[in-house]
Amino acid sequence: MSNGWILPEDVLRDAPSYAPRPAELADLELLLTGAYAPLSGFMTRADLASLGRRGRLADGTSWPVPVTLQVPAALADGLELADPARRALVLTDGEGAPVAAMDVIDVWPTRDGTVGVGGAVRRLGDGGHGPFQRLRRGPDEVRGLLPPGRVLGVFADRALHRPQLAQIAHAARTLGAHLLVLIPVGEESSGGLPAEALVRSVFAARDRMPPATLVAVPLARRSDEISDALLRARVAAAYGVTHLLSTEGMLSGAGLRVLVPRELAYDNRDGQWRWREDIPPRNRRLALGQHEIDDLLDRGFPLPEWHTPPAVARELARARPPRRHRGLVIFLTGLSGSGKSTIARTLADVLREQGDRTITLLDGDVVRRELSAGLGFSKADRDLNVRRIGWVAAEIARHRGVGICCPIAPYAAARSTAREMAQAAGAGFLLVHVATPLAVCEQRDRKGLYARARAGLLTGMTGIDDPYEEPTDADLVVDTSDLTVEEAVQRVLEHLTETGWVEPRMQPA
């Protein structure tokens, strides 16, 4: 490796390894391909301090946003920054395959249990695996494919419908520019679609574009729109873009002109898309909003052809089938003895009788025995248990089954993580709070746990000496102190039917 950084095979073999989070892996890939030039690695404290003060790196180079990596503090403790042979860190993908080696030259505390690390990165291995790898071309390769002259860049982070395609065609024609479509694939889901479905939907619109080059870019969104827009402009410039078409607002940077098109509307006199103000109101149809598109797909209605090319509509219908055919996680949470397991078992039986989808019940006690054996009842162990349940349920739902979970899940953050995993898998998530009061749960006490906790024979009992954080984001609340099990299950079924997750059923006479 260059720049005086020479790592023998035995050094890499003995170096610690770490799998960055998805957004950090996206940054890593862009560092390795040169899309983040002049950055050659994750930023150090000096770079971050300079960026915060004056919007430039420590060497004075202009740069828009932080690009950082955080690792567990215990992992960094084994690095010796003064010794180049003992400060290497191997960065892997989520499956543990090496992606890059990092020369860690700076370490600093960030929050409890984690530290920031800075230093250059170098690729290891063959460049990764996964869908559409052939489209993940680096900036150098892409620039070599582009014709001379102006290049119009478009970040296609959602499917391209007729109004967007009309805007693109108009801008390319006006500029006399070649079109470069950059498809962000750096997150589990982009614009409500899995990354591979997004790529397919954009390709489905290719025959309605001017001559174009399509590239998949592992670019994750930043937390605020300004930082996101500035970084996108920087990456687009690295790929050879001279003009960037945007609907986010007018910005300039990285040597680019960012264009904001006027709003288009559909003219029902001749079926063309024109500037909105050029069409009489009685002949004008506005473009569908994303919420309207999602609602049509969720209910199983076709997207109108005046708005969406049929090939794009087919890809979107494949990626987002009607709710009644989509995977779903039903997550019941509540105190021990609240009735959540009984509700979950009865609900599973009813849904199995209907036979529409595969139903899997992940009971808290069974999961503790089969999936989380060895875990205790500390906060960290409880969170890990819920995370495991959430991951399994999300994988069930990814394949269009229904995962029904009923752990106590006392902490809001762990429940939120379970919701995020389900949604990242393209599935629905229904949080049911079984809000039976503590006094009723104690009175039932089928397992004798409350009595033992009150007697001081058991510690860490949720509701007694360990907190239960009541959900503020529950989709449904039931209380079995004033409902029978059958009535509670019926409430859940009614909610599922009203929201489209379950087909309406005729009630027996």
Image (cartoon, rainbow, N blue to C red):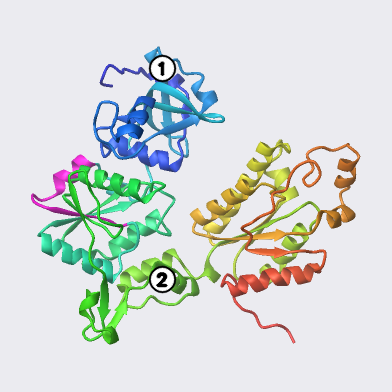
| Quarter containing the C terminus | bottom right
- The answer to whether residue 227 of the structure is visible from this angle is yes
Point out residue 162 in the picture as x, y percentages from the top left corner. 27, 71
Pointer 2 residue: 293
Secondary structure of residue under mark 2: helix
Name the residue nearer the viewer: 20 or 231.
Answer: 231
Q: Residue at x 37, y 66 (%)?
A: 315
Q: In the image, is residue 151 part of the stretch drawn in magenta?
A: yes
Q: Earlier in the sequence, mark 1 or mark 2?
A: 1
Point out residue 485 in the picture as x, y percentages from the top left corner. 79, 67
Q: Is residue 87 left or right of residue 146?
A: right
Range of magenta residues: 139-156
| Corner quadrant of residue 402 | bottom right
| Quarter containing the N terminus | top left
**Within 10 Å of the Cα at label 1, are there few (<14), some (14-19), or many (20+) other Cα atoms?**
few
Pointer 1 residue: 10
